[in-house]
Amino acid sequence: MSTNKQSFGINYVDLGTWLHQLNGVTKFLLFITWITVVLTTFDLRIIIPLILIGLYLLKETKVPFSAYKPLLIGTATVLSMNAVFMFLLAPNQGNELLGSTTVLLPIFGSYAITQETLFYLVTVTLKYFSMFPIALVFVFTTHPTEFAASLHRLGLPYKIAYAVSLTLRYLPEVKSDFINIMHAQQARGVDLSKNVPVFTRISNIAKILGPLIFSSLDRADEISNAMVLRGFGRGKSRTWFSEKAITKTDKVIMLGLFVIVVLAIIKRVFETSLFWYPFN
C-alpha cells in the first residue's frame, strides 16, 4: 500500500524507520528526558534547537506533513492565545522577571508592550511548543502493546503497563469522536469557522468538549467491563505477544539521555538567573 493511501491520525504508524526500530522504553525515556530539559530551562539557546531537532525527528517518522499539520497549527494557535491572556493578566511580569523595562508600544494605563515582556512571552510560548513534536514522534513510532511489554519487562506491574497501552490505543478513538461530535454540532448550526469572532469560536469549541468528555467516560466504562469479563487482573503475571528486545543501540541512547538529564539539572542548579536575556 502506498503511503498516500494510508490513514493517519494520532496513532502508531508502522513505516519501518530507524525510530520505529528503537525499543519503546528508549523512546519513552527520550520523551521524559526532553520534558525534563524543557522544564528546567528558560534558555532560548536550548529551546530553539530542541524545536528544530523535534521537527527533524518528526520528519524522520515519514508520516506525511498533512497528517499532523492541523495539530501543529492548532497547538501554535492555542499557545499564542495563552500568551495574549498572560499579557492581559500580568502585563508587567516580563519586566519583573528580567529586571528592566524598555517600552516599545504604550497602550493604556499599566498596559504597554515592552521588550522584556515580549521576550518573556516568546520564550514561554516556544518552551511549551518544544514539547509537542517529540510527543508526536513518540506516538507515531511506538506500538502500544510492544511499549507495554517493554515496561513490564523493566519491572512495571503489567496492569499499569497495560493501562499505558490502552491510553495510546485510545488516542485515535478520541480524535474520531471529536470529529463526529464536531460535525454533529456544525449540523446544528454551531460555527467554528473564521466567520465568527475568536471568543465565539472558543465558546463553540466548549460545546464539543463537553460531549467528548462524556463519550470518553462511557467508552472507558465499556472497556473496564470488557476487561473484567475477560478475567483481566486475576493472574500475577502475563505473557506478551509483542515484545522487543533492548538492543545495544538502545543502551547507548539511554546512556546518552542519562548524561543529558544530569547536565540539565546541573545547569539549572548552578545558573544565576532563571531566564537567559541577551539584552541586559
Image: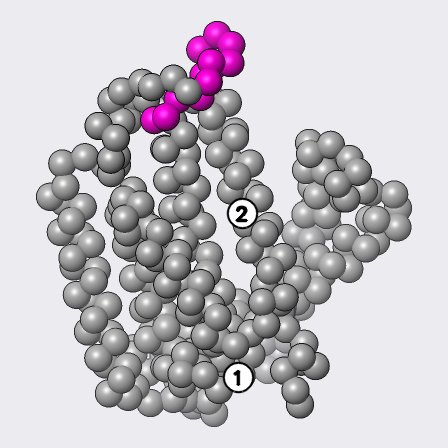
- Based on the picture, tell me whether residue 170 belongs to the magenta stretch: no
Q: Count the labels in the image.
A: 2
Q: Nearer the viewer, residue 99 or 171?
A: 99
Question: Which disc number belongs to residue 15?
Answer: 1
> What residue lies at 33% left-to-right and 56% top-to-bottom?
49
* Residue 30, quarter of the rendered image: bottom left
Q: Which residues are magenta?
A: 105-116
> What residue lies at 69% left-to-right and 53% top-to-bottom?
212
Q: Nearer the viewer, residue 177 or 48?
A: 48
Q: Which residue is mark 2?
A: 76
Q: Is residue 15 above or below residue 101?
A: below
> What residue lies at 22% left-to-right and 28% top-to-bottom?
280
Q: Left of 33 or right of it: where is 167?
A: right
- At label 2, the amino acid type is Ala
- At label 1, the amino acid type is Leu
> What residue lies at 28% left-to-right and 51% top-to-bottom?
46
Residue 219 seen: no
